[in-house]
Structures are given as structure tokens and as C-alpha cells.
Image (cartoon, grey):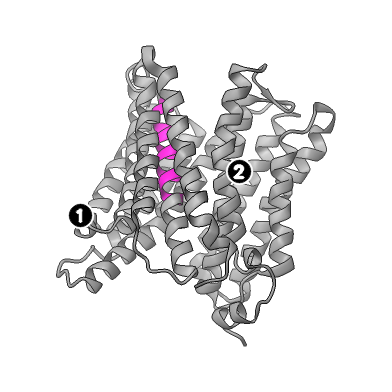
């Protein structure tokens, strides 16, 4: 059987469809640049609607299932072959899956008369993608990554539930479930790669200290995080949910400290992983405290610690690292990459702080949106050419 590397060498089609990260990282980042301004324009210059959808609901959907769905697809289509030893999805198969993602983004602008078929088109992408992940993992007998399969399936089902809100009376549980699933993926996969890449850097640079290896504390923290996120999805304002969320946040903060990110403070490609994971702990604590002190700690601060912080920063960290590595470039951040990171972190900080300052909230939201779009535009400009060309 050919190896993944051999398969890449044999592939003769367009470079964009030679590996999953190329089309999905590039298009998802471009969508992240455009989606926030589209929503803001709909609010300020229009009637607040995007297509037949309320602008806020469209914004939530496109960030969770559009942008993040695409990034997760790009990451897993690249990582799963390494986990399973099976050949990656390339060429026409990859192009077809990518076309389905693009169709989902276009479906968001459909008129009310086409709401049902538009929902089917959009939902199809994550369902098909989940089936691909299951096929690859099961065919390889790779039981270790079954939780990833379950999480991707849960994300696909959350998207279906989100669309059902347009036809039957259901609450906002679908979007909370999607946030919980994605944060669960960050805790699971981020918890693997962050200490691993930190250890690789310390070994390469002769640093004696090492991150703590995965052990019982990590297992307990992951279990506690799962319980906390489930409680939040079911009853976000309940005091018991607040207690579990806060405890899980502290546990994740301790877990992060055990990885000793300061050892790699000279390499932005490593420390950004720690910075991204820190938002998981911050988001858990803020949402926990909002259950106890809703007037003092707005729940939107915790939500955006998850979305703009953990999701936005961690996806940029993984996209830059994977792109550099899989295109034959050194895994070292240049000044432009570092600027992308700092801009994304600034966007997250401003967005989380915005609801704490009522008189400045709208202005801070505008600043955060601008910084967010600039960060992802930077990624498109710097890393886009790498994904459109053959590896060096």
C-alpha cells in the first residue's frame, strides 16, 4: 500500500486539491474575513437580515458550522491519514466535498421560499464529512480516535437541529451544543498537540525542563470538562452548572500550567497554542461565574472567550503550523505570522471585554470585528500562496 507521502508525490492534479488543509483552510479563512462584515453591514445599512435569516442567527451559524466546520474538515482530512495510515482524500473526492461546503455558504443567502432545500444543502456537508471520518477511522481499527468521530457527528446533528428552528419551535440548545462540541475538540486535540509540540521544541533547543506528560490529571480534567459542557448545554443558568464550569475552568488552567508554555516563549508557533488553550479555561470560568453573578459577569463574555478566543486563536495556530509543515517550510513563525497571532489575540481580548463596558460596547465590538478580519486577511495573504502552489 502506498504511503501518504507517496500518494502526494503521485498526485498530478491542481495543488489546491492535493491535501485537505489547502482548500478548507484557505476558503474558511477568507470566509472569516467576510462573514463578520456581512453581518455588520446587514445591521447598520439593512434590515438586519441575511437572506431569509435573522442576521444574528446567520452570524452564529456561519461562525460555528461554516468557518469552524471548514477548518475542522481541513484539519481532520490532514490529520486522520497520519492517525490511521490510510491514504488521504484528494483530487475529485476532495473537490466534491469542498464544493458541498461552498454550496452551504451560498445557501445562507437563499430567499424564504427556498429555506427548506437550503437547509438540506447546508446540513449535507457535515453529514458527509462525518461519514468520511467514520469510514477512515473504522477501516483502520483506530479506536483511540472514536471520540473524534463522535464529536464530528454531534456537530453535524447540532447543525441539523439549528436548521430545524426555522420549522419547529426549539430553543438555542443547538448552538450551545455546537460550541460545547468544538470546545471539547480543542480540549481533546489541543491537549494532545500543545504539550507534544512544546516538548519537541524543548528537545530541539536543549531545554532540560519538559511539559508534564499526559496522565491521570489530564483524564480527570477532560472528564470534568465534558460534564461541565454538558451541564451548560442543558441548563446554562443553573447554579450547579456554574459550579462545575468554574471548577473545570480552574482544572484546565492548572493543566495548561503543567505544559510549561513559557519554556517556548521564543517561538510564536508554539506559545500561540498555549495562548489559544488559555481561552478554554477563561471561557469556562466566565460562564461559571455568570451563573452566579449574571449582572456582573455577562454570559456573552464567556461565549466569546470560547468563540473569538479559544476557537479563533487555536484554529489560526493550527492552520499556520499545519500549512508550514505540509508545504515543506520550517515550523518557525516569521514576523507576519506573529502579527497575525497578536491581532487575533487582541480581537479576542476586546470582544470579551466589550460587554463589561456598556457605554463602549458598540465601539469595542467594531474594533474587535476589524481586528478579527485583519487577522484572517493576514492569514489569507501570507499563507494563501503556500496552499495554491506545490510544496517547496
What residue sits 57% from the left and 58% below the top?
74
Dot 1: element? helix
Q: Which residue is mark 1?
A: 262
Q: Nearer the viewer, residue 49 or 38?
A: 38
Total marks placed: 2
Vertical placement of 143 versus 370: above or below?
below
- Tell me the tag on residue 65: 2
In the rendered structure, the answer to whether residue 156 lies left or right of residue 383 reads right
- Tell me the tag on residue 328: none
Vertical placement of 379 versus 330: above or below?
above
- Farthest top residue in view: 359
What residue sits 45% from the left and 35% below the top?
232
Q: Quadrant of residue 334?
A: bottom left
What residue sits 23% from the left and 57% below the top?
266
Does any portion of residue 78 appear in the rendered image?
yes
Query: Residue 361 at what x, y percent from top left?
Result: 41, 18
The stretch of residues the image draws in magenta is: 299-315
Dot 2: element? helix
Q: Nearer the viewer, residue 48 or 363?
A: 363
Q: Which of the marked residues, 2 or 1, is nearer the chain's N terminus?
A: 2
Q: CA distance from mark 2 to mark 1?
A: 33 Å
Residue 313 part of the magenta segment = yes
Vertical placement of 164 versus 390: above or below?
above
Residue 389 part of the magenta segment = no
Label 2: few (<14), some (14–19) or many (≥20) C-alpha neighbours in 10 Å: many
- Farthest bottom residue in view: 1
Does any portion of residue 307 appear in the rendered image?
no
Amino acid at each position: 500500500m502506498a504511503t501518504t507521502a507517496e500518494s502526494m508525490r503521485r498526485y498530478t492534479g491542481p495543488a489546491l486539491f492535493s491535501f485537505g488543509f489547502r482548500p478548507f483552510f484557505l476558503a474558511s479563512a477568507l470566509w472569516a474575513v467576510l462573514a463578520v462584515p456581512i453581518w455588520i453591514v446587514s445591521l447598520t445599512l439593512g434590515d438586519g437580515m441575511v437572506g431569509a435569516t435573522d442576521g444574528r442567527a446567520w452570524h452564529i451559524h456561519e461562525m460555528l458550522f461554516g468557518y469552524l466546520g471548514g477548518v475542522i474538515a481541513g484539519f481532520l482530512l490532514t490529520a486522520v491519514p497520519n492517525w490511521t495510515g490510510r491514504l488521504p482524500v484528494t483530487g475529485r473526492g476532495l473537490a466534491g466535498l469542498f464544493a458541498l461546503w461552498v454550496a452551504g455558504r451560498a445557501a445562507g443567502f437563499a430567499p424564504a421560499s427556498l429555506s427548506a432545500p437550503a437547509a438540506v444543502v447546508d446540513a449535507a456537508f457535515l453529514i458527509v464529512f462525518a461519514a468520511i471520518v467514520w469510514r477512515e477511522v473504522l477501516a483502520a481499527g483506530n479506536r483511540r480516535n472514536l471520540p473524534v468521530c463522535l464529536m464530528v457527528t454531534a456537530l453535524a446533528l447540532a447543525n441539523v437541529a439549528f436548521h430545524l428552528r426555522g420549522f419547529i419551535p426549539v430553543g438555542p440548545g443547538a448552538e450551545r451544543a455546537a460550541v460545547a462540541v468544538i470546545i471539547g475538540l480543542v480540549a481533546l486535540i489541543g491537549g494532545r498537540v500543545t504539550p507534544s509540540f512544546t516538548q519537541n521544541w524543548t528537545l530541539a533547543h536543549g531545554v532540560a525542563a519538559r511539559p508534564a506528560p499526559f496522565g491521570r490529571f489530564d483524564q480527570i480534567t477532560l472528564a470534568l470538562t465534558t460534564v461541565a459542557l454538558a451541564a451548560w448545554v442543558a441548563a446554562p443558568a443553573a447554579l450547579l452548572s456554574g459550579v462545575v464550569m468554574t471548577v473545570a475552568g480552574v482544572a484546565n488552567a492548572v493543566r495548561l500550567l503543567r505544559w510549561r508554555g513559557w519554556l517556548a516563549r521564543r517561538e510564536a508557533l508554539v506559545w500561540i497554542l498555549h495562548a489559544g488553550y488559555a481561552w478554554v479555561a477563561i471561557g469556562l470560568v466566565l460562564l461559571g461565574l455568570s451563573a452566579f453573578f449574571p449582572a456582573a459577569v455577562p454570559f456573552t463574555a464567556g461565549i466569546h472567550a470560547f468563540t473569538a478566543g479559544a476557537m479563533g486563536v487555536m484554529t489560526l495556530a493550527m492552520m499556520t503550523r499545519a500549512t508550514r509543515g505540509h508545504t515543506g517550510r520550517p515550523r518557525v513563525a516569521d514576523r507576519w505570522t506573529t502579527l497575525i497571532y497578536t491581532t487575533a489575540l487582541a480581537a479576542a481580548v476586546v470582544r470579551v471585554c466589550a460587554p463589561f463596558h456598556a457605554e463602549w460596547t458598540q465601539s469595542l465590538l467594531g474594533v474587535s470585528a476589524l481586528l478579527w478580519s485583519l487577522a484572517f486577511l493576514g492569514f489569507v495573504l501570507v499563507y494563501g500562496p503556500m496552499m495554491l502552489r506545490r510544496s517547496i
